[in-house]
Structures are given as structure tokens and as C-alpha cells.
Amino acid sequence: MGGLSLRGIGSKHIAFESTATARLVLHIAIQAVRSAGGLVACWDTDSVFVIATPEGRLVPAPGGSNRTEEGREAVHAISFAEVEQLLRSNSC
């Protein structure tokens, strides 16, 4: 009988490869956002939280490296369309 044999491959190997692949995909997504001029607020095991607004603009945020017209500290939010483009072009 033919077919796939998993003999010699333990669950530790599968768990390691799954975790390593997930981390790689997360960091590819983070780098894609940063390359587009965006900012990642945080990430978790299976998620990347991108600072974005419908049209893209400065968003007031303490400690931000930019300033709003009112002089408040802010960060640059990319647009929803830019996020969608990243998803399409990087298959994140």
C-alpha cells in the first residue's frame, strides 16, 4: 500500500514547524506594513494589528514621532485601501 508515511516524524517536529512557519508569516506581514509606511500596533500568535483609517491620516498618539496640525504627538495611519493592497500583494 502506497501513501504518505509519517514514521520517524514526531509531534514535536510538526509543532516546531507549525510554530516556526506562523512566526515567519507574522514577520513577513509586519515587514510589509512597515515597508508601506504603516505602523503595527501589536501582534499575537495569529494576528497583526495595523494602525489604519478609511482614508489614511495622522492619528493622535502619545509618543508618536509626528505632530498633528494642533501640535499633538501622532502616528501615521495607512488607509484601508493600502491594507487591502498589502493583503492582495503579499497573500498575508
Image (spheres, rainbow, N blue to C red):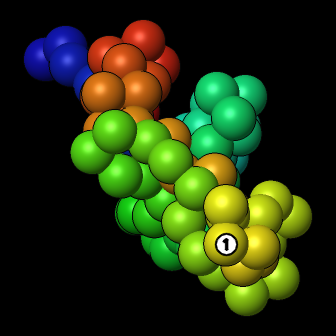
Which residue sits at x=76%, y=73%? 71
Q: Circle 1 is placed at which residue position?
A: 70
Residue 87 relative to residue 90: left or right: left
| Type of amino acid at the residue the image marks with label 1 | Glu
Image coordinates of residue 3 in percent, x first then y, are: 21, 19
Instruction: Return the residue found at the far left.
Output: 1
Which residue sits at x=51%, y=74%? 44
Which residue sits at x=37%, y=19%? 85
Residue 21: name its quadrant.
top right
> Looking at the picture, does residue 26 appear above or below residue 74?
above
Image coordinates of residue 64 in percent, x first then y, are: 78, 72
Residue 58 relative to residue 54: left or right: right
Residue 74 or 33: which is nearer the viewer? 74
Image coordinates of residue 73 in percent, x first then y, are: 76, 76
Residue 23 or 71: which is nearer the viewer? 71
Quadrant containing the C terminus in the rendered view: top left
> Looking at the picture, does residue 81 appear above or below residue 54?
above
Label 1 secondary element: loop
Residue 88 relative to residue 28: left or right: left
Quadrant containing the N terminus in the rendered view: top left
Image coordinates of residue 2 in percent, x first then y, are: 19, 14
Which residue sits at x=44%, y=42%? 56
Residue 50 or 11: which is nearer the viewer? 50
> Looking at the picture, does residue 71 appear above or below residue 83?
below
Residue 69 or 25: which is nearer the viewer? 69
